[in-house]
Image: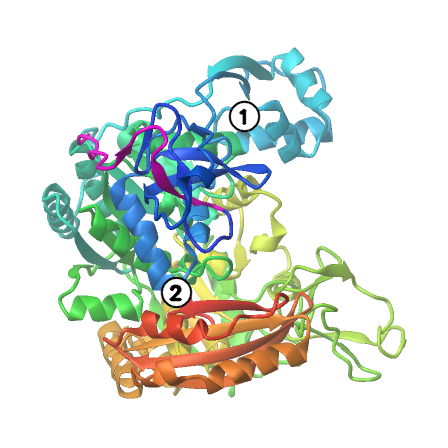
């Protein structure tokens, strides 16, 4: 591990210092240094009104008023100080996203009890004993404990996770099924051995691994686009970069787009390095979250596997960031602080002389353009690992298929599924739409059931017997009568979701074992993991799923993929519609034929002549990216231009439109850099959670001082108390 950076600013007791808190304030506040002094980056507890709040020493105080009025810092917390490079990262990320500094600091301190001294605590682990009898409550407790993969948990965490009283857990402790022990509150993670034997790499993989090892070993910043067809073994290649990083004594971070992928990936890490790494995502207990945060800062965690927010952990010496499936839209945070983890990973690495690996079978256009321009190195894996070959892709022209009404599996696709089942192989039917039906319509009055709080239709989830709004999460029982006209028995589902597709498949393929994969159907990540493992072991004949099945899962018996509606993503005016459809279809098709048996993908489409469908079928990815880049370049759209979405919301529709219109009129700061303002206009979903939403879109040439102009423009008007204004730099969604 490298020596800690020197702390340039040490402040004697009583000195004026600036402290940035996590509270919604304009910036740092001045305080007096405590007894014993403090230093830049120290985590401190300071008084703010009647409360005590968390803060970080940000530098010397600004002054401008009597020092006698300053309140002293209460105490310096027992935590590794925030390093200079981390403070710079927070500042630059805040400037780029136009986010207030305190909000950005909150992202970097999202762990409980950061200031608590190391202490002992009572924790629970799985024991060898078994209770005399198992109840539903006891089963939930044991399942919750298993879900954490052997991590120690507290009594309250386990009770809350299982939804039981503490007496249920204590009964299992008494029976020996759960062990209770004293443990240090925060302990280092096990050592990961980078020199354990690894899988034998192909010549392509070995060449790529050598290139990444050399890059990591250089100790300098750099970004590599690792592009490999699905099943080419990208993970094994970047795992060698992780191993080199560990040999250098530096820390590594691997970002994954879905929690569902974490468990399988952790097993691969344990097989490669002999121990489990640190985890950071929403499924981790608060106890483990605090441990991870502290150990990352102290150097007691050499590898972190996590979600996008793991970028904001206080690494002591970060040497490598891997962004797996870097094209995935879940890397964009769409509420709170609006940032793209892929872009922030590159920024973070540039500030601490680390390497970045952006891995994907279908890279984002931004990454592809940067690689073409020479800003990123490019590493391609062109063939699948071992004997596996890429699947054949074919379009099924739905205009020529004889399909009854309210059915979605074409006769040609149905015949292909039966043929695979007869061979003992698996078929996947893919539809990127959760629930049973996207619309519930009254056949008496024509009314579509909408959400009470949003301008969005409620989606029928028949398995849950609920209507659910996918915008705000509101749900209600499926009504017997129309809420609008009162007619009974006249409500009808319109359009397919995966649940309805499963119903049709059960009718079309009697006796088939059908597994339905959709994020809303599993109460825990453990249940989802068990289902995925069962599929991989051959416990299903037909898999029906949403985009969750397109992300990194390996089903050896899966040889046929049927896409029910390949045209679905091509609708609307989203500038990335073609790119996303191309990526999703190629990813889904890549699930087929990943073992010895060759695979096939059939895309049901009403537009087989569409340029995107033709590109998917031809496999000419480079040609697709070049054509897409030419279109964006001609239109001045990202990544060849700059864009920002301004979303204003209020409970009063008149108020939000008036404010947006006035803001649009005062566009002089934007006109000075040649930027254009479009709008205001109602957002495509004009009301969410009872708040009316209006959008403005700002477009500018690349290379202009975009953020500075936006900040000047927005600062001209102060929003009313009830009005919220969010700035989305480089928007991914236009809803």
| Residue designated by label 1 | 153
In the picture, which quadrant includes the N terminus? top left
**Which corner quadrant of the image does residue 609 belong to?**
bottom left
- Magenta region, main secondary structure: loop
Compared to residue 67, the image places residue 37 above or below, namely above
Residue in the image at 62% along x and 23% along y: 155
Q: Position of residue 158 (x, y in %)?
A: 61, 28
On screen, residue 366 versus residue 329, left or right, reads left
Residue in the image at 63% along x and 71% along y: 650
| Residue designated by label 2 | 589
Q: Position of residue 368 (x, y in %)?
A: 24, 68
On screen, residue 463 versus residue 674, left or right, reads right
Q: Magenta segment, which residues?
A: 1-22
Whichever of callouts 2 and 1 sits on the residue coming sooner in the sequence is 1
Mark 2 vs mark 1: give the one in front: 1
On screen, residue 314 versus residue 284, left or right, reads left
- 184 or 448, nearer to the observer: 184
Q: Which labelled disc corresponds to residue 136? A: none
Compared to residue 120, the image places residue 213 above or below, namely below
Circle 1 — which element? loop
Residue in the image at 19% along x and 56% along y: 224
């Amino acid at each position: 591990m490298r020596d800690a950076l020197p702390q340039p600013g040490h402040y004697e007791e009583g000195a004026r210092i600036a402290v940035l808190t996590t509270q919604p304030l304009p910036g740092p506040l001045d305080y007096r240094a405590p007894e014993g002094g403090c230093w830049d980056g120290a985590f401190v507890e300071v008084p703010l009104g009647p409360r005590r709040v968390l803060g970080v020493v940000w530098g010397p105080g600004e002054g401008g008023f009597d020092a006698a009025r300053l309140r002293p810092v209460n105490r310096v917390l027992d935590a590794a100080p925030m390093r200079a490079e981390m403070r710079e990262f927070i500042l630059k990320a805040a400037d780029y996203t136009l986010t207030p500094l305190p909000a950005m600091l909150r992202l970097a301190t999202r762990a409980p009890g950061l200031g608590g001294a190391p202490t002992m605590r009572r924790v629970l682990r799985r024991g060898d004993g078994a209770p005399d009898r198992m109840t539903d409550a006891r089963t939930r407790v044991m399942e919750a404990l298993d879900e954490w993969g052997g991590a120690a948990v507290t009594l309250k965490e386990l009770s809350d996770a299982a939804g039981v009283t503490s007496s249920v857990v204590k009964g299992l402790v008494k029976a020996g099924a759960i062990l209770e022990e004293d443990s240090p509150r925060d302990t280092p993670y096990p050592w990961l051995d980078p020199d354990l034997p690894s899988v034998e790499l192909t010549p392509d993989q070995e060449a790529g691994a050598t290139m990444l090892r050399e890059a990591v070993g250089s100790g300098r910043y750099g970004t590599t686009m690792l592009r490999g067809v699905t099943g080419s073994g990208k993970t094994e290649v970047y795992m060698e970069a992780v191993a080199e990083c560990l040999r250098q004594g530096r820390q590594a971070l691997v970002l994954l787009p879905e929690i569902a992928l974490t468990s399988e990936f952790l097993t691969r890490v344990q097989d490669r390095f002999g121990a489990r790494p640190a985890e950071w995502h929403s499924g981790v207990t608060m106890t483990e979250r605090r441990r991870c945060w502290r150990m990352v800062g102290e150097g007691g965690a050499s590898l972190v596997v996590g979600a996008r927010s793991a970028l904001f952990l206080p690494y002591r010496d970060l040497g490598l960031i891997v962004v797996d499936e870097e094209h995935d839209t879940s890397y964009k945070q769409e509420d709170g602080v609006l940032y793209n983890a892929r872009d922030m990973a590159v920024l973070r690495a540039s500030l601490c002389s680390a390497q970045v690996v952006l891995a994907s079978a279908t890279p984002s256009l931004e990454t592809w353009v940067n690689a073409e321009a020479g800003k990123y190195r490019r590493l391609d894996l062109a063939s699948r690992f071992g004997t596996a070959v890429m699947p054949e892709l074919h379009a099924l022209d739905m205009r020529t298929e004889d399909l009854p009404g309210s059915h979605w599996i074409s006769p040609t696709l149905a015949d292909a599924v039966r043929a695979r089942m007869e061979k003992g192989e698996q078929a996947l039917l893919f539809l990127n739409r959760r629930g049973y039906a996207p619309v519930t319509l009254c056949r008496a009055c024509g009314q579509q059931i909408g959400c009470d709080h949003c301008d969005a239709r409620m989606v029928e989830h028949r398995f849950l017997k609920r209507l659910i709004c996918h915008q705000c999460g509101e749900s209600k029982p499926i009504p017997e009568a129309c809420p609008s006209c009162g007619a009974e028995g006249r409500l009808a589902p319109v359009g397919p979701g995966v649940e309805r597709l499963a119903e049709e498949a059960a009718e079309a393929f009697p006796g088939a074992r059908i597994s339905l994969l959709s994020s809303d159907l599993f109460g825990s990540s453990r249940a989802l993991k068990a289902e995925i493992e069962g599929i991989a072991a051959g416990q299903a004949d037909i898999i029906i799923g949403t985009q969750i099945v397109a992300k990194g899962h390996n089903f050896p018996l899966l040889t046929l993929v049927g896409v029910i509606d390949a045209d679905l993503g091509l609708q609307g005016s989203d500038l990335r519609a073609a790119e996303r459809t191309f990526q999703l279809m190629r990813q889904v098709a890549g699930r087929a034929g990943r073992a010895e048996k060759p695979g096939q993908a059939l895309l049901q489409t009403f537009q087989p002549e569409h340029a995107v469908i033709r590109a998917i079928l031809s496999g000419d990815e480079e040609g697709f990216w070049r054509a897409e880049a030419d279109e964006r370049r001609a239109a001045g759209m990202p990544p060849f231009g700059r864009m920002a979405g301004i979303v204003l919301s209020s409970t009063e529709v008149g108020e939000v439109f008036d404010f947006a219109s006035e803001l649009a009129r005062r566009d002089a700061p934007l006109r000075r850099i040649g930027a254009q303002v479009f709008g205001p206009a109602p957002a495509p979903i004009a009301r969410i959670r009872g708040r009316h939403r209006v959008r403005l879109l700002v477009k500018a040439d690349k290379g202009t001082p975009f953020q500075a102009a936006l900040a000047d423009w927005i600062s001209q008007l102060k929003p009313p108390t009830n009005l919220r204004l969010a700035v989305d730099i480089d928007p991914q969604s236009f809803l």
